[in-house]
Amino acid sequence: MPSALVIGGVSFNIMVYLDRLPEPVPHSIFSRGFHETIGSTGAGKALNLCKLGFDTTLHAPIGDDANGRWVASYLEAAGVRFLYDIDPMGTQRHVNLMDAAGQRVSIFIVPGTFEPAFDRARLAALVPGSDYVLLNISNYCRQLVPDIQAAGKAIWCDLHDYDGTNPYHHDFITAADYLLLSSDALPGYRDFMARMIAQGKQLVVCTHGARGSTALTAAGEWIETPIIPKYAPVDANGAGDSFFVGMLYGHAQGLGVRQCLRLGTIASGLCVTTHDLAFPGLSPALLASEYAAAYGEPLNLK
């Protein structure tokens, strides 16, 4: 069983579903529904990793509050080994407004401490024994970069909606060996991807929502992967994390980049059919069967 260490990114969210995102004027809106649930990119990645057979450890700050206790219980019930330090500002909480097209506006009503105190030595001790290290872009995570590099581990990093210039991301970009990002705020994503490969990245992948994904390999190969239309979208929340983990699962299985991207596409497609951060029935067997159905060829797994 491969092991994965996920660092950063847990919240307690309220999801509000709207026909369309609100105009920036005072008015009243009736939602199509809402629910409270776990959120953020670390939780999304960890939950998908567990379902695909990884021995998964997640670290994130939470508050000494009811929301933090609920988050910890949820993750542990799902099989995630959850380590945390206490944030005096409380557990992060977001209000996510989701429209019918899957677009999202996230409002950070409890943003958490920007520079939280945490037990760095405890986390650094876990790095050498982890097969994969997923470093999220929570501010405190950048402090772990020297420890990860000293252990000789590759850094997998998701930049989300990086705009090509924001200096906040630069430490993560410099440190990462494998990069994922969205083209939402980066129309010139191909130029950025090419620069990253020229700087020595092993793989750069850019997702485009309903337009699929684009990858550039270390060998200079561009690979375009469309979505699979049969997955009817219900909620796009968590789709990017599911894609990331599906792709990483293929890598752990020794598959080629094209197959890894297809697995990411399947995991993401399954995710959007539910309100969960990870498709409830996700498993290696399901990925293999969905792969054969979508692409007309068997998937040779370890």
Image (spheres, helix red, strand yellow):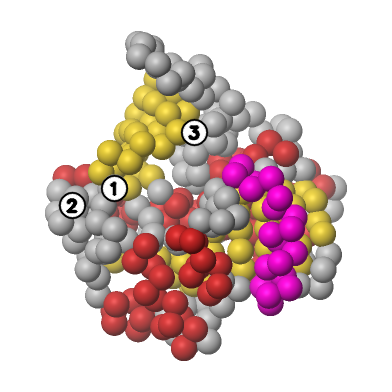
Q: In this orientation, which residue lies closer to the viewer: 253 or 147? A: 147
Residue at numbered disc 2: 89
Q: Give coordinates of residue 20: x percent, y percent.
A: 51, 19
Residue at numbered disc 3: 104
Three-letter code, disc 1? Pro
Q: Residues within 10 Å of mark 2 (few under 14, many from 20)?
A: some
Q: Residues within 10 Å of mark 1 (few under 14, many from 20)?
A: some
Give how far apart the Cα atoms at labels 2 and 3 are. 25 Å
Q: Secondary structure at mark 3?
A: strand
Q: Give coordinates of residue 263: x percent, y percent.
A: 68, 54
**Residue at x 75% of width, y 64% of height:** 194
Q: Residues within 10 Å of mark 3 (few under 14, many from 20)?
A: many
Residue at numbered disc 1: 111
Magenta stretch: give its range. 183-203
**Residue at x 80% of width, y 51% of height:** 224
Cβ–Cβ below 8 Å for labels 1 and 2?
yes
Closer to the chain start, of discs 1 and 2, is: 2
